[in-house]
Image (spheres, helix red, strand yellow):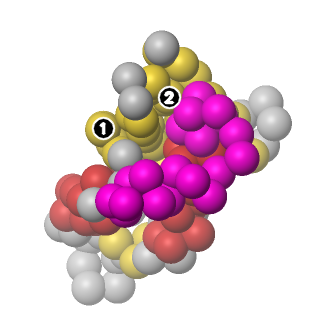
Amino acid sequence: MDRDNEAASRFVCSVRERCIFETGIKLATIYHQYVGTPFNGESIESLEKAMERSIMVQPYVSDVRISIDRSVLPPKEDHYSYVSLGGNMIDAIVEVTIDGITVRSEMRFDEELGYPLMYVSDIRE
């Protein structure tokens, strides 16, 4: 048995439900692995790319896009000018595809809720 089939045999749910589960795992990884990471104007793009690449290597990820809010950067930078990444600064989109089903989930800071909300935004079968 190959590894994909071996892994699939452990799930007691539909492929659609598994895709939803997988996107949740990926978004939680982004949040819990990177919140607190220091960055500045020089490193923000490389941090976004590192976050994207770390998610792309995980199983079933077909697309990932991450953007960090640049308005948090200080207007003048010196070696004391850096910011620690917060959940309110991350916009993330993760897509997972398994057996022709693609689920897109997103993480955005919801101003009304005052919370970095993770949610399913699209399911294509």
**Residue displayed at 45% across by 24% down:** 101
The kind of residue on which mark 1 rests is Asp
Q: Amino acid at mark 2?
A: Val
Task: Look at mark 2 in the image and give the residue it sits on.
Answer: 103
Residue visible at 50% across and 28% down in the picture: 103
Label 2 packing within 10 angstroms: few (<14), some (14-19), many (20+): many
Q: Is residue 47 above or below residue 103?
A: below
Q: Position of residue 107 (x, y in %)?
A: 57, 41
- Is 27 in front, or is 81? 27
Based on the picture, tell me whether residue 2 belongs to the magenta stretch: yes
Q: Earlier in the sequence, mark 2 or mark 1?
A: 1
* Number of other residues with Cα within 10 Å of mark 1, as a class: few under 14, some 14 to 19, many 20 or more: some
Q: Is residue 45 above or below residue 114?
A: below
Residue at point 33% right, 59% down?
2
- Looking at the rendering, the stretch of residues picked out in magenta corresponds to 1-19
Q: Quadrant of residue 82?
A: bottom left
Q: Residue 62 vs residue 32: left or right?
A: left
Residue 22 visible somewhere in the drawing: yes
Residue underneath mark 1: 63
